[in-house]
Amino acid sequence: MELSIEHITHAYDTTQVLEDISFSVQPGEIVCIVGPSGCGKSTLLRFVGGLERPNAGQVMLHGAPPAGCLNPLTYIFQDFALLPWRTVEGNVSLVLEDHRMPRAQIRAVIDDVLARTNLTDFRRALPRQLSGGMKQRVAIARALSVRPAVMLMDEPLSALDAQTRELLMDDLVELWTREHFSACYVTHNLAEAVRLGHKVIVLSRRPGRIREIVQIDIPLSERPERGAELDRLQRQVWQIMREEARQADMELTDAA
Amino acid sequence: MLHERVQERPPAVAPPEIAIRPEAQPVPFRGGGFQPERQPYVAWLVFAVLLLLWEAGSRTGLISSIVLPAPSQAFGAFMDLVRTGMLWKHLDASLYRLIVGWTAGTALGIVVGLLIGLSSLARAGLLQLVSALFAIPKIALLPLFVVWFGIGEGSKVATILFGTFFPTVIATYAGVDGVDRNLIRMGQSFGLSSRSIVRKIIVPGALPAILSGFRISASIAIVLLVAAEMIGAQYGIGAYILTAGALFATDQLIAGVAILAVIGLVISWLISRAERFFLRWRV
């Protein structure tokens, strides 16, 4: 399934947020969106998944969803968005219960995704007992359970400490190597972007426009060994962004 | 049981030897305090000391028995109630009114509170009305209820129902407002039906606020119970207190008030149990 974002433009009241954004997400591709804070990255992702409507432009899905797909566009949120009153398995089960699946099948799906995210031992734990990294693993398991065509990841590692972030990045790479999921990955962390992205879209400061699209052809699995090349790429992206970020930092924020 | 995965760890490096010099001084402790600790027996002790002082004051004549009867006299009045079996008649009548009125009032309050919380139309139409009626002392309406619902059980139950309805509405809609919007967006992003979102995300999320609303509505219910039983009631703790007051039987009056206090304590304990059960997921 291919996702194309076509000429998205948006303004809140009088503040122009996004201007003519177009790009596509191919099957099995991770597209990272980076940009200075307040450039509308997260807003863009909400348009992509249909949680908000842009003033102009549209998001199109091409082709039929893969077999067994329950929710083609599935989010992973920065704040995890787990129900604190449900256990790990209850949180996964939440998104399956509305699909009229037999109980045994729900159980089987839960067992499967918990095993794939190494959470089997924690299935009866409540979110408050888990570390930030484990909570995000639960959210990933929940997303996997609906067999998404495209994962929409909104700064999924930004609420975690640097060490946990490294661990989860490795997990994501491993997951991608196995399943070749496609994703639209919003982040402000350039190291994440060059580590996970096949394509890095650099947005300008508000109003967000596409400044540049950086293609990264190094296979994900080889990236840890080719640190020098990644560093060069990261510096390249930073050069593009640097002045934008500096300007964005000095802007007054009147808009909410 | 969850976190104790036994793993082999590399041996720790021995800490370097530190020679303590003679002029060294330990850093003085400056933290601590400002943190409530559990002191389970103090409450009972305060209660017992107060009772003892009161009893002693009465026995020595420092407190006139007309002004305030001794605790032992009040206890005597209470034992009279038990002996004659009147205690159960009064309790039976009062608890019936309390339970029916409070249950109906909170049930309706939760329904209307959810409506106000979920629908902009209901909020626009009802919120001001609820705020206006909430402020009216329901005791003032009691004569009206007698006209509407009769001098029997109807007016008494209606008073408690009205009194508990409004605080529950306000607690419930505030609870719904307080539910994390990100959780609702999450539900929508996974394609959950509105029914599921209300049932599985909004109601459990508002439950802490609803339960603390129960505490308020329960104490309001007890206050209104006594008020309602002062008109046309033969039995009931409120009627008993009223009769005792009319006869200046202050020992009976104190006994009746003590029974109300115990009812209040029991209800508060029940709500704590409910909170511990339903809100296990909180710390």
Image (cartoon, coloured by chain):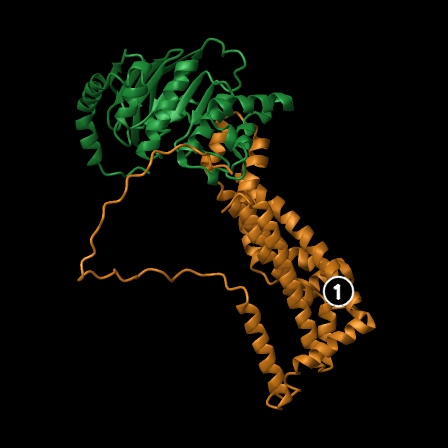
Q: Is residue B143 left or right of residue B8?
A: right
Query: A106 and A131: which one is in front?
Result: A131
Chain B's shade in the image? orange
**Residue shown at 64%/67% (left/top)?**
B261
Q: Position of residue A86 (x, y in %)?
A: 54, 36
The amino acid marked with disc number 1 is Leu
Residue B253 visible, this orientation: yes
Q: In which quarter of the view is residue B61 placed?
A: bottom right
Q: Residues within 10 Å of mark 1 (few under 14, many from 20)?
A: some
Q: Position of residue A80 (x, y in %)?
A: 43, 33
Q: Which chain is green?
A: A
In the rendered image of this protein, does residue B48 appear above or below residue B221?
A: below
In what quadrant of the picture does the N terminus of chain A appear?
top left
The chain to which mark 1 is attached is: B
**Residue shown at 30%/61% (left/top)?**
B29
Q: Position of residue B270 (x, y in %)?
A: 64, 55
